[in-house]
Amino acid sequence: GSGDIGYTRAMASRIQALSYRVTHVGKATSFNYPQTQVFYPPGGEAIGVRLAKELGVPVQPLPGGRDPRRLVVIVGPKRLAN
């Protein structure tokens, strides 16, 4: 969602460093995401909330899905440090 694949790959590396398995990194079909967000499927709220807290980003439920351990992270634009 950021339009910057380098930043997206860096975020994927950060997630892997937190001991999550990343299975796919790619360009989003839309680049109008205002910020990075973690999405979790039914039954995956606890792990979704945990990752979102570790990244300091919002979390949202997915409308479907079968694997409660499969999270989706949409990477938004880079945040500037305060």
Image: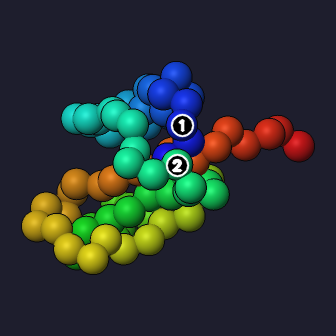
Q: What's the residue at 22%, 35% (across, down)? A: 23
Q: Quadrant of residue 41?
A: bottom left
Q: Is the residue 74 above or below the residue 63 in the image?
A: above
- Alpha carbons under labels 1 and 2: distance apart: 6 Å
Q: What's the residue at 56%, 55% (across, down)? A: 32
Which amino acid type corresponds to the residue marked 1 in the rendered image? Gly
Residue bearing mark 2:
31
Which amino acid type corresponds to the residue marked 2 in the rendered image? Phe
Q: Is the residue 11 above or below the residue 37 in the image?
A: above
Q: Nearer the viewer, residue 33 or 24?
A: 33
Q: Earlier in the sequence, mark 1 or mark 2?
A: 1
Q: Secondary structure at mark 2?
A: loop
Label 2: few (<14), some (14–19) or many (≥20) C-alpha neighbours in 10 Å? some
Asked if the residues shown at circle 1 and circle 2 are in contact, with their CB atoms under 8 angstroms apart, the answer is: yes
Quadrant of the drawing holding the C terminus: top right
Q: Quadrant of residue 49?
A: bottom left
Residue bearing mark 1:
3
Residue 47, position in %: x, y? 34, 60
Q: Could you say which disc has been placed on residue 53 in the image?
A: none
Q: Is the residue 27 above or below the residue 39 in the image?
A: above
